[in-house]
Image: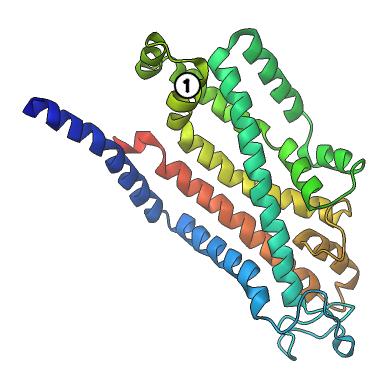
Amino acid sequence: MSHAAIQADVAASGEPVLQRNRAIDRFMRHKLAVAGMAMIAFLLMVCFIGPLLLPFDDLFIDIKHRFAPPFVSVHVLGTDPLGRDHLARLMMAGRISLSIGFAAMLMAVVLGTVVGAVAGYYGGVIGAVLMRLVDAMLCFPSIFLILAIAAFIHPGVVSITIIIALTSWMEVARVVEGQMKSLRERDFAVAAELMGGTDRYIIFRELLPNAVGPIVVAATLNVANAILMESYISFLGYGIQPPTPSWGNMLNNAQQYLERAPWLAIFPGLAITIAVTSFNFIGDGLRDALDPRLDH
């Protein structure tokens, strides 16, 4: 191999690393995105490790300390009407709400990616039918669609996750479909087709890896949306059912005690706000970091 060819190979192999480093640098300069990442890491650590460090679990009832306010007893964030530790329930509710958010996001991304990839790659009648299905589902407000489905299904963590995923994949499909249309005509895709690559190979090995950026951004925003949707339907009584805690049903249970024990609503509401805002900040940072136009 000639010296020029070796240099070309080195440059080609180093370019993805350089682009990745630039993306990381752009993300790290986005202060709100970094703060959001730190806050999500903190929430995950608190919700999944914190309960192991508490002397009370989320079902322990301390009848002598019912409605104990925060920071005045062994119950740091106070207790609820039954005397259950509010911090323990808040952490366990975070486990449920965050797990639903991530699981629903994964399911929605997989379904949306498959539908969008098929529609964008094949186009024609197949693409038109699939995208009209997407448009039809987008016509219905997500919250009403979720409530309509939840009314006929026994509420639980798995069923609520599936419902949220089935009503939130459409945005991912539209993003992927647009990327597939754009990438389908690129030289590398045409070359792969001319070399005899199958449709599956071209879609999953050539096109989708080049559409990872927008998919990652959509996935991040989808987690925030899933957490918010779970909170909505649990607050309205159609989601996670007691005694299993979630941030949404904690708000639902707290609404009748707003005057007597406002902390029962303040802390889960604050947790939802922090989680959703942090994921939105991360999504904004990833959008800026993965935008190839910023390299020029």
Mark 1 — residue?
201
The x, y position of residue 183, in whole percent, is: 44, 21
Drawn side of residue 172 relative to residue 82, left or right: left
Instruction: Tell me which residue sits at (74%, 64%) in the image.
Output: 93
Q: Is residue 109 above or below residue 200?
A: below
The x, y position of residue 65, in whole percent, is: 85, 88
Instruction: Tell me which residue sits at (68%, 66%) in the image.
Output: 270
The x, y position of residue 283, in whole percent, is: 53, 47
Mark 1 residue type: Tyr
Decide which of 92, 143 is in the foreground and name it.
92
Drawn side of residue 294 relative to residue 208, left or right: left
| Tag 1 secondary structure | helix
Estimate how packed mark 1 is, as few (under 14), some (14 to 19) or many (20 or more) residues with alpha carbons within 10 Å.
few
Dividing the picture into quadrants, the one containing residue 120 is: top right
Q: Is residue 174 above or below residue 248?
A: above
Drawn side of residue 250 relative to residue 109, left or right: right
Drawn side of residue 219 relative to residue 152, left or right: left
